[in-house]
Amino acid sequence: MNLKGRDFISTQDWTKEELLSALDKAADLKKKFKQGIPHRELPDKTVFLFFFDKSTRTRNSFEAGITQLGGHGHFIEAHTSQIAHGESPKDMGIILSGYGHGIAIRHDLVPGEGNRYMREVAKYAEIPVLNMQCDVDHPFQMMADLMTIREKFGPDLKGKKIAVSWAYAPSYAKPMSVPQGLIMLMTRFGMDVTLAHPPEYSLMEETLATAKSNANESGGRFKIVDSMEEAFKDADVVYPKSWGIQSMFDRPEEALEISKKYKHWICDSDKMKLAGPDSIYMHCLPADRGYEVTDEVIDGPHSVVYQEAENRLHTCKAIMALTM
Ligand code: CP
């Protein structure tokens, strides 16, 4: 399968076969990394890493990943570049295509902007555009999550239940792209996906429609409920995390006041008892400990958060190696 030159902006843009071949590649690179076998598959190649938002896992998995593949990553805070003076995505896409081999962008905090911006860069770039998280999807996180779920439950996920739930967090209005990415991707693999959130926290309509259509096509299920407890019942995977109110990302103080009504939306050991005995607890991190989740759960036997975070490196390297 030849994926050279392909953009990776949403998992939805790739076929299931293409996604699975990337996961095979990630498993191979994971094995090599752990055994200390060199895998310099992108010697002398450069990826430009543009961040409009903060990051720990994404930045470091890309920078460490490209180094281990024999290339180099340029970390760029968007506000220090000419983007801040209004340079167009077209000019940036064309010019950087002459300098290197991949353009990766994180632009996730303004609903309606990030995905559109990346697709505009991609329209003009001659090198792959990689989405390090936008307002719609977080495809590199999704690949690490799918890899982790398959490591736990095997390749056939048909009928496995995943609860994607909103949870309270006071730190900041987290992007909507993780729950949206999860409902779109896990329905494609036949999973029984239940989304739970208080009324104010509905996700983007197009992602809900995509999840429904994916579930119909794969034989999976997709439903929305208004209780974390209901979503968790008999779940194999629970993925409770916070996100912001779509219409209020520009009014964080007001949104935080609304969220305080839902402090009881925390993943604790009582809620974990509703899930299956072999269930796993997932979170893309960073988590607001003591708010989104108790220490007992995130540090407990069901939690796979560190394996999940580690898989960010291997999936990131796989997609760079295949596309760049
Ligand atoms: N999960 C994730 O994307 O982490 P960072 O925000 O630290 O990159």
Image: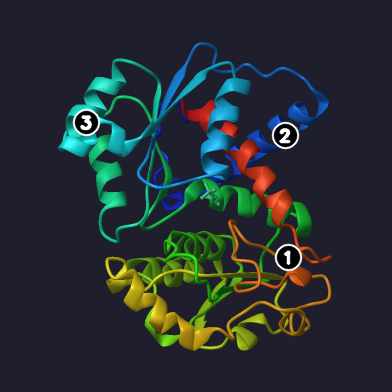
Query: Helix, strand or loop at disc 3?
Result: helix
Residue type, mark 1 in image? Ile
Residue furthest to the top: 44
Position above or below: 138 against 208: above
Q: Residue 171 placed where, x, y %?
A: 49, 65
**Residue that mark 3 sits on:** 82
Q: Residue 23 placed where, x, y %?
A: 63, 42
Mark 3 vs 2: CB contact within 8 A:
no
Q: Residue 323 placed where, x, y %?
A: 47, 29
Query: Helix, strand or loop at disc 2?
Result: helix
Q: Residues within 10 Å of mark 2 (few under 14, many from 20)?
A: some
Q: Earlier in the sequence, mark 3 or mark 1?
A: 3
**Residue that mark 2 sits on:** 30
Residue 205 can be seen in this image: no
Position above or below: 184 against 97: below
**Residue that mark 1 sits on:** 298
